[in-house]
Every structure is written in structure tokens, then in C-alpha cells.
Image (cartoon, rainbow, N blue to C red):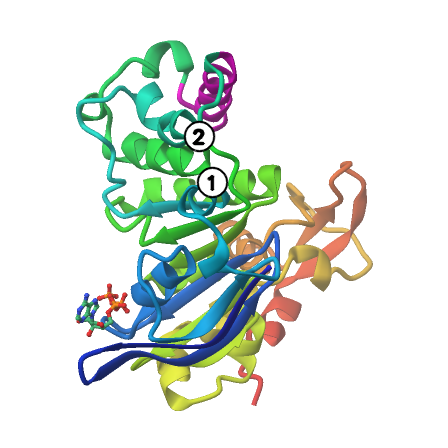
Amino acid sequence: MIEIDAIIKRYDDSTVVDNVSMVVEPRTVTVIVGTSGSGKTTLLRMINRLVEPTSGMIRLDGEDNRSIPGHELRRRIGYAIQGHGLFPHRTVAQNIATVPALLGWEKSRIDAKVEELLTLFQLEPKMFASRYPHELSGGQQQRVGVARALAAEPKVLLMDEPFGALDPIIRAKAQDDLLAIQRHFGTTIVLVTHDMDEAFHLANKIAVMDKGRVLQYGQPAELVRAPATPFVETLIGDAERPFRLLSIARAGAAVEPGEAEGAPISEDRTQREALAELLWTGRDAVSVISASGARIGRVTLDTLLKRAARPR
Ligand SMILES: Nc1ncnc2c1ncn2[C@@H]1O[C@H](COP(=O)(O)OP(=O)(O)OP(=O)(O)O)[C@@H](O)[C@H]1O
């Protein structure tokens, strides 16, 4: 758990993080969004003490982060940034091994970790371990950057616009990979982004920042249903609201009894995907199946349109 308690950061006369308090639950993804210059990066970097707060306290599992030695902070908290910051003259394997090597892990343990991470990130170890960063595509470099941040098995991963440089298709894939890996390791992730679609795709909770303050901190559905301020409403995007509502709920939650013609969809797909399927195939209803493949009912176009309707 990360407890951010009345954190303030001032540079000269300007207050760039203004009395922020929030709690990040373990094994969740928290996304910080907001306009440029609103203090997102500064807030993130106070968690691993790359920036020292002017006042306030941040606790990691109950421990004041100022009382945790630097090497221990680096072990507990991974950090991945846009542009990935890979060392150009070190191989992929050496890049990933950076923190474990600093921590003095045995070579066999490091090698096993590098292989595990490369495999998890779908980079065939035999092909990629000995390459240099310039021999990788942008998307591959980005994956190595995240793999490196995870190498010492940190409980917490801080990510600052990690996918900012990727094209939309690779970006969507990178987001899915991240969620799979987050579940695999049970990592607590705090991620900064400008991209609201990314926020809604990844977040268990979203913090909206403006001028150094957190205006709202809640589950995506809360932000859509009850935006705390007009700023939050604007940032979420009024026009996309129906789709956001559908993209944060699973098809399984809209099931009703009955059958439908044509290919079924899985209950864990989003309602937005169910709607897309219906619109693409011109059907009024689609059968829904459970993870084990059993038919559990159907979702109708009518139901989805009602769910997408303005809540007020
Ligand atoms: N070392 C510094 N010295 C002085 N001012 C700083 C420093 N670092 C950041 N700032 C200022 O603090 C404010 C918040 O910066 P920060 O990088 O946290 O914003 P951000 O929300 O991450 O912005 P962006 O989305 O553009 O990256 C900005 O006005 C920035 O100019």
C-alpha cells in the first residue's frame, strides 16, 4: 500500500503539488491524469524520492519512504519512463540485469530472471538477449524498458507516459501486456498518462490532477457517473461518455436469459466490445459464454444502448 499524506512540493514561489493525499491499494493500477504541468510527474517522483517533498509524508506499507535506504527503494520500486531510458551500449540482457546486478544477485539468478522476463514480454531470449537497443523496434525497446523496471521483482512500479511514443496499435498491445504482467506478479502500478483512453483501459482507480491538486480520485465508473467538477467532466470527454460506460463493464454483467444466432462472445469481454460486435455483424443480440465455454445467456443491442444512455 502507498499512502500519500498531505504532500506539498514548492519550487520558489510556485506550488506544483498542492496538499495531495491519496491511498494506493496493493496489486492495483492507479492512473494519474491531468493537463500538462499539473504536477503528475512531480507527484509520481516523490513516491521513489527522485523528488523530495517540501512537506508531507509518503508511506510504503506503513514505512516512511525517507527512512528506507536508497538501494532498498530501488529494489522495491521499479521506474519506467517514456523513451525507456535504455543504456545504448549495453545489451538487452545487461539492461534488464541492471538493478539485480547492483543488488549483487548471483549470475544464475540474474540469467533466469532475464530469460523469464524476455519470455513474458514475448521477446525470444535467444534472439533478443544479446542485441543492443538500436537493434530493436520502438515497441520492443519499450518492452525491454518495462522488463528492466520489473527485474528486481519490485512490489511497486511507477510509470511515466510509458507508452507515449508508441503508435496506437502497438500501444494497445503494450497496455494489454502490462495488465497481464501486473496480474502475473501482483505488482502495484502507478502510471501517469495524458491519454484518457489509456487511463480507462488500465485503471482500477484514476486520480485527476489540475494545478497541483487532485480534483477527484476514484474508480473509472465513479468519474463517469459523477464527475466531481466541470474540469473532470471535460477531461473525461462528454462525447465519449457512453463508450466509456460500456468499456468499463463486462458483457457478463448485461446478460439476460435467451439465445442468439451467430458466434458467441466471452463474458469477460467489455460491453463496448459486445456493442461493436453487434454493430459490425448487424445482429440484435449475441450469445454470451463463460470462460469454460458454457452458454450463459445473451446480450441485446437494446440493453447495451440503455446502459450507454446518459445517467442524468
Ligand atoms: N525542478 C524543477 N524546478 C522548477 N520547477 C519545476 C521543476 N520540476 C517541475 N517544475 C514545474 O512544476 C510543474 C509541474 O511539473 P510536472 O512535470 O510535475 O507536470 P506534469 O503534470 O507531469 O506535466 P506534463 O504532463 O507536461 O509532463 C510545472 O510547472 C513545471 O514547470
Location of mark 2 (residue): 103
The rendered magenta stretch, by its main secondary structure, is classed as helix
Location of mark 1 (residue): 75
Residue 244 coordinates in the image, percent (x, y): 49, 68
Q: Depth check: 131 or 111 in front?
A: 111
Tag 2: amino acid = Leu
Label 1 to label 2: alpha-carbon separation: 8 Å
- Asked if residue 172 is positioned above or below residue 125 in the image, the reply reads below
Using residue 253 as the reference point, say whether residue 91 is left or right of it: left
Q: Earlier in the sequence, mark 1 or mark 2?
A: 1
- Asked if residue 91 is positioned above or below residue 47 in the image, the reply reads above
Residue at x 53%, y 59% (from the top left corner): 272
**Quadrant in which the N terminus is drawn:** bottom right
- Asked if residue 299 is positioned above or below residue 136 in the image, the reply reads below
Tag 1: amino acid = Arg
Ligand 1 quarter of the rendering:
bottom left
Residue 142, which numbered label?
A: none
- Asked if residue 280 is positioned above or below residue 311 in the image, the reply reads above
Using residue 170 as the reference point, say whether residue 87 is left or right of it: left
Residue 104 coordinates in the image, percent (x, y): 44, 24
SS assignment at label 1: helix
**Quadrant in which the C terminus is drawn:** bottom right
Q: Depth check: 173 or 49 in front?
A: 49
Asked if labels 2 and 1 touch by Cβ distance under 8 angstroms, the answer is: yes
SS assignment at label 2: loop
Residue 211, by quadrant, is bottom left
Residue 125 coordinates in the image, percent (x, y): 41, 14
Q: Magenta segment, which residues?
A: 108-123
Q: Is residue 85 magenta?
A: no
Residue at x 69%, y 59% (from the top left corner): 299
Residue 266 coordinates in the image, percent (x, y): 67, 45
